[in-house]
């Protein structure tokens, strides 16, 4: 994993997605090149996005209708206070919600200080949600993981393993079964909530899958636009491992090979599957996803099997039959 801590500009973080975020730039275009430092992984998007608060300003400030009314006819001391905060550089972006427009004095201040001033037709609550999501993706420490990232049964599954083991081939088989491709080769990972990480693909290679012998495939052209997703939470990691004769034969056949991976201070379950001739890996990955869903609902098939076996033994002992099995239970 390679942590990404390099700065990101306002143009990269917000202006590049202005249409999707519902933003229209009104002033402060000279501040688009301003660099913003990424925060550590444990940071929260709330540390970047908040409603206008001059006493405790964040990087992105939203002006809702109530705050807008207070700014339309500012007293001189109010204007001076806003000027001091903008001049200090604590605020980088101001967004006015609900299709309101900035007063002229605020536009002048933003042009002078290089603070990007936007307006949006979206409600302040919609803006808050979208800007928080964008801040989580762009302003908080990220890392990159190697593998093929799919959404299978609405479960985000990162398939990992050594080069040439067949990750892309498994992905193709799963796409045939209705899975959706999020990223191939390099997955950009960020904390999307305090207890969840998400992954996405860079725009350059989004929607493409490299398969040995076939080259680069355009998944949307082959399977349709719905076969590609922009991003998804990472719920499960499936690691493909080559079978080692004489080493793996003694593994516990009842208990799945599951461990917890720590990624950006978040725990993600990882299950290991052995790759060997005759094993249908796509079926196994799909079964691993179904089992993961069972676990989320508190169902443990191994525990249920052991409990059932124990009850059968106890019932036979009470009947004085010992541990012997009937002809239909061998």
Image (spheres, rainbow, N blue to C red):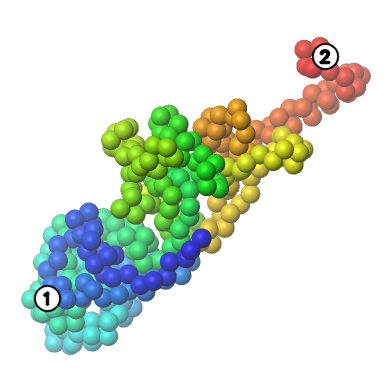
- Number of other residues with Cα within 10 Å of mark 2, as a class: few under 14, some 14 to 19, many 20 or more: few
The answer to whether residue 269 of the structure is visible from this angle is yes
Instruction: Answer above or below: position of 5 versus 97.
Output: below
Q: Residue sitting at 30 percent across and 80 percent down? A: 90
The answer to whether residue 181 of the structure is visible from this angle is no
Q: Position of residue 58 (x, y in %)?
A: 32, 74
Q: Position of residue 325 (x, y in %)?
A: 84, 18
In this rendering, the count of numbered labels is 2
- Number of other residues with Cα within 10 Å of mark 1, as a class: few under 14, some 14 to 19, many 20 or more: some
Front residue of this view, candidates 158 and 195: 158
Q: Which residue is mark 1?
A: 107
Q: Is residue 11 left or right of residue 284?
A: left
Q: Residue 19 lies in what quarter of the image? A: bottom left
Q: Is residue 206 left or right of residue 257?
A: left
Q: Which residue is mark 2?
A: 326
The mark nearer the N terminus, 2 or 1, is 1
Pick the quarter of the image with the C terminus.
Answer: top right
Q: Position of residue 231 (x, y in %)?
A: 37, 49
Circle 1 SS class: helix
Q: Position of residue 187 (x, y in %)?
A: 43, 53
Q: Residue sitting at 12 percent across and 68 percent down? A: 26
Front residue of this view, candidates 231 and 318: 231
């Amino acid at each position: 994993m390679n942590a990404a801590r390099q700065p990101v500009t306002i143009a990269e973080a917000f202006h590049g997605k202005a249409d999707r975020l519902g933003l229209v730039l009104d002033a402060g275009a000279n501040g688009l090149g301003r660099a913003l430092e990424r925060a550590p992984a444990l940071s929260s998007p709330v540390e970047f996005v908040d409603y206008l608060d001059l006493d405790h300003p964040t990087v992105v400030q939203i002006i809702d209708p109530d705050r807008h009314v207070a700014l339309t006819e500012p007293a001189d001391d109010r204007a001076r206070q806003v000027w001091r905060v903008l001049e200090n550089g604590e605020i980088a972006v101001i967004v006015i919600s609900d299709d309101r427009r900035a007063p002229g004095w605020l536009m002048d201040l933003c042009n002078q200080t290089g603070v990007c001033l936007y307006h949006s037709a979206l409600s302040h609550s919609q803006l808050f949600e979208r800007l928080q999501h964008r801040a989580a993706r762009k302003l908080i420490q990220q890392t990159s993981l190697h593998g093929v990232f799919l959404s299978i049964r609405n479960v985000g599954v990162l398939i990992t393993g050594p080069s040439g083991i067949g990750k892309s081939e498994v992905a193709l088989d799963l796409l045939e079964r209705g899975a959706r491709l999020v990223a191939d080769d390099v997955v950009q990972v960020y904390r999307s909530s305090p207890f969840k990480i998400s992954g996405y693909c860079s725009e350059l290679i989004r929607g493409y899958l490299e398969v040995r012998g076939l080259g680069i495939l355009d998944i949307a052209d082959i399977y349709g636009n719905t076969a590609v997703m922009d991003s998804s939470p990472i719920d499960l990691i499936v690691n493909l491992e080559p079978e080692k004769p004489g080493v793996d034969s003694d593994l516990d056949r009842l208990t799945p090979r599951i461990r917890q991976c720590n990624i950006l201070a978040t725990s993600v379950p990882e299950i290991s599957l052995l790759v060997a001739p005759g094993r249908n890996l796509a079926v196994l990955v799909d079964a691993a996803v179904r089992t993961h869903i069972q676990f989320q609902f508190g169902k443990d098939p191994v525990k249920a099997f052991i409990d059932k076996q124990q009850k059968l033994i106890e019932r036979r002992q009470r009947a004085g039959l010992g541990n012997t099995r009937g002809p239909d239970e061998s």
